[in-house]
Amino acid sequence: MTHIGKKIVVTTPTGHVGSRVVRLLLQAGVRPTLLVRDPARLDAVTRDRVDIVQCDQGDSDAVRHATRGADRLFWVDPPAPADSNPIAHYTRMGANAAHAVEANGIGHVVFLSSVGAEKRTGAGEIDGLARTELLLDETSAEVVHLRCGYFFTNLLMDLAGLRAGQLPTSWPLDYPMAWVDPRDIGEIAAARLLSDWSGRQRQAVHGPQDLTFTQVAAILSRALGHPIRATRISHNDFRATLRAAGLSPDHAEGIAGMSAGLSEGFVPEDKRSIITTTPTALAAWAHVHLAPLVGTS
């Protein structure tokens, strides 16, 4: 059963996942309410078909006011500022979401979480997403946590390195993990927002297959038309690189802590299945989205 007549609120609607959620809701006949910090980032065509509330998700009162009357909420903890502690940042955002859910009696919440949140501690900044899971679970809403794999779009963060044929990472090169297209995550989130469920649930979003960084480099080599070599950097060197880029010590630790905490003996709680597997292959995504930016030879 779908709920086109329900008021659906979407946070981070201009992000890789949120923008896909918005498009699918529009195509389903829904006029969603979008919480956005900078409405100018929305394209004109979308603005004509949605209700916009300018809102800083870090402002608890603003979030409560912006979600008044909502039946369903897609919640994404917004990215942490470079000078912040990301675990504390995500925890505060989660508390704001939980407060709004309780205050406004929001019935269903879809939360964008991550593989590794099941550890609860020891997974770097993902610990903040784990705390958001717990805070939402304490509300009276029906909640589903989407525990997502490693985003394809993370590759967009080092285009210069890819142009130079390098794929540096702090993950072990032979460690297989879920890689996923954020658009596919958006499709699952939209499906959940338009359907019924009850209780506290989790749904992993693992992409089409687990990949090692060595395999990713081979895929990118073919897609980009020049050799890409994956190289392992130590966790300490990675922390130093992040600090040199202007991140605070806490923020650098939060990012480095993900690979440090999840690559040694970690096994995701949610197994790969027909439910967790999404269709878009990394090769196809790279041809469409990465090759034009990197340049092929």
Image (spheres, helix red, strand yellow):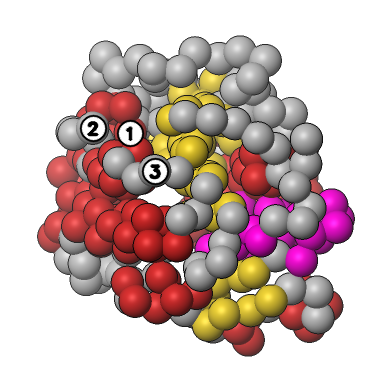
Depth order, front residue of 290/65: 65
Q: Which residue is mark 1?
A: 117
Labelled disc at residue 220:
none
Residue at 32% x, 60% y is: 99
Decide which of tag 1 and tag 3 comes sooner along the chain.
Answer: 1
Decide which of tag 3 and tag 2 comes sooner along the chain.
Answer: 2
Q: Secondary structure at mark 3?
A: loop
Q: Secondary structure at mark 2?
A: loop
Depth order, front residue of 291/246: 246
Disc 3 to disc 2, how far (Cα)?
21 Å
Labelled disc at residue 120:
2
Depth order, front residue of 7/158: 7
Question: Can residue 86 be found in the magenta stretch?
Answer: no
Residue at 40% x, 25% y is: 173
Residue 145, percent from left and from top? 46, 36
Q: Residues within 10 Å of mark 1 (few under 14, many from 20)?
A: many
Q: Quadrant of residue 231?
A: top left
Residue bounds of the magenta highlight: 7-31
Q: Which residue is mark 3?
A: 140
Depth-wise, is mark 3 or mark 2 nearer the camera? 3
Depth-wise, is mark 1 or mark 3 nearer the camera? 3
Image side of residue 141 versus residue 30, left or right: left
Disc 1 to disc 3, how far (Cα)?
21 Å
Image side of residue 56 versus residue 36, left or right: left
Residue at 16% x, 43% y is: 236
Disc 1 to disc 2, how far (Cα)?
5 Å
Q: Secondary structure at mark 1?
A: helix
